[in-house]
Image (tube, helix red, strand yellow):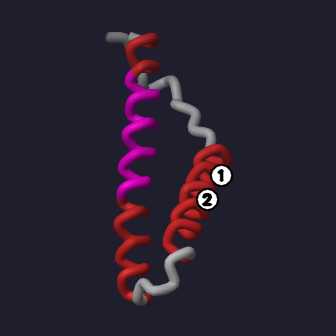
Amino acid sequence: MKNIKGKKLKFNLKEFISTYIRCLALIMVITVIPNLINKVEIAVTYLMAGIFIGALIITVIVLKFRRRWKEIG
Protein backbone atom coordinates (compact mmCIF):
# COMPACT_ATOMS: atom_id res chain seq x y z
CA MET A 1 0.00 0.00 0.00
CA LYS A 2 1.27 3.45 -0.93
CA ASN A 3 1.64 6.33 1.51
CA ILE A 4 -1.74 8.06 2.03
CA LYS A 5 -0.48 10.75 4.44
CA GLY A 6 0.47 13.11 1.60
CA LYS A 7 -3.01 13.09 0.08
CA LYS A 8 -5.86 14.72 1.99
CA LEU A 9 -9.33 13.35 1.40
CA LYS A 10 -11.71 16.12 0.35
CA PHE A 11 -15.14 16.22 1.93
CA ASN A 12 -18.01 18.27 0.49
CA LEU A 13 -19.45 20.04 3.55
CA LYS A 14 -22.18 21.94 1.67
CA GLU A 15 -23.56 18.71 0.22
CA PHE A 16 -23.47 17.06 3.66
CA ILE A 17 -25.31 19.95 5.36
CA SER A 18 -27.97 20.23 2.65
CA THR A 19 -28.64 16.47 2.80
CA TYR A 20 -28.83 16.57 6.60
CA ILE A 21 -31.26 19.53 6.55
CA ARG A 22 -33.44 17.79 3.98
CA CYS A 23 -33.62 14.66 6.12
CA LEU A 24 -34.48 16.71 9.22
CA ALA A 25 -37.17 18.60 7.28
CA LEU A 26 -38.66 15.27 6.18
CA ILE A 27 -38.70 14.04 9.80
CA MET A 28 -40.29 17.34 10.92
CA VAL A 29 -43.08 16.89 8.38
CA ILE A 30 -43.63 13.28 9.48
CA THR A 31 -43.64 14.10 13.22
CA VAL A 32 -45.55 17.40 13.12
CA ILE A 33 -48.53 16.10 11.08
CA PRO A 34 -49.89 13.94 13.95
CA ASN A 35 -50.33 16.63 16.62
CA LEU A 36 -51.60 14.07 19.14
CA ILE A 37 -48.03 12.98 19.93
CA ASN A 38 -46.62 14.39 23.20
CA LYS A 39 -43.66 16.79 23.08
CA VAL A 40 -41.41 14.28 24.86
CA GLU A 41 -42.19 11.62 22.29
CA ILE A 42 -41.38 14.07 19.46
CA ALA A 43 -38.04 14.91 21.12
CA VAL A 44 -37.21 11.20 21.41
CA THR A 45 -38.23 10.68 17.77
CA TYR A 46 -35.92 13.52 16.66
CA LEU A 47 -33.07 12.10 18.75
CA MET A 48 -33.48 8.59 17.32
CA ALA A 49 -33.85 9.90 13.76
CA GLY A 50 -30.77 12.11 14.20
CA ILE A 51 -28.70 9.16 15.39
CA PHE A 52 -30.00 7.01 12.52
CA ILE A 53 -29.29 9.66 9.85
CA GLY A 54 -25.86 10.37 11.37
CA ALA A 55 -24.97 6.67 11.24
CA LEU A 56 -26.25 6.44 7.66
CA ILE A 57 -24.17 9.44 6.51
CA ILE A 58 -21.05 8.18 8.31
CA THR A 59 -21.49 4.80 6.60
CA VAL A 60 -21.74 6.50 3.18
CA ILE A 61 -18.61 8.59 3.90
CA VAL A 62 -16.65 5.52 5.03
CA LEU A 63 -17.67 3.61 1.90
CA LYS A 64 -16.60 6.54 -0.33
CA PHE A 65 -13.24 6.83 1.44
CA ARG A 66 -12.68 3.06 1.21
CA ARG A 67 -13.10 3.24 -2.56
CA ARG A 68 -10.61 6.10 -2.76
CA TRP A 69 -8.10 4.27 -0.56
CA LYS A 70 -8.39 1.24 -2.85
CA GLU A 71 -7.72 3.48 -5.86
CA ILE A 72 -4.69 5.07 -4.16
CA GLY A 73 -3.44 1.72 -2.86
Q: Is residue 27 above or below residue 62?
A: below
The residue identified by callout 1 is 18
Q: What residue is drawn where x is 52% and y is 30%?
A: 8
Q: What residue is drawn where x is 43% and y is 28%?
A: 65
| Magenta span contains residue 57 | yes
Q: Quadrant of the N terminus?
A: top left
The residue identified by callout 2 is 21
Relative image position of residue 27 (x, y in whole percent): 52, 64
Relative image position of residue 13 (x, y in whole percent): 62, 47
Q: What residue is drawn where x is 42% and y is 54%?
A: 54
- Neighbor class of circle 1 (other Cα within 10 Å; few <14, some 14-19, many 20+) is few
Secondary structure found at label 1: helix
Q: Main secondary structure of the magenta part?
A: helix
Q: Callout 2, which amino acid?
A: Ile
Q: Is residue 31 above or below residue 56?
A: below
Q: Which residues are magenta?
A: 52-66
Q: Seen in the image, is 37 located left or right of residue 9? A: left
Secondary structure found at label 2: helix
Q: Is residue 22 above or below residue 28?
A: above
CB of mark 2 within 8 Å of CB of mark 1?
yes
Q: Nearer the viewer, residue 34 or 66?
A: 34
Q: Callout 1, which amino acid?
A: Ser
Q: What residue is drawn where x is 61% and y is 59%?
A: 21
Residue 57: mark in rendering: none
- Label tally: 2
Q: Seen in the image, is 61 located left or right of residue 29? A: left
Relative image position of residue 63 (x, y in whole percent): 39, 29
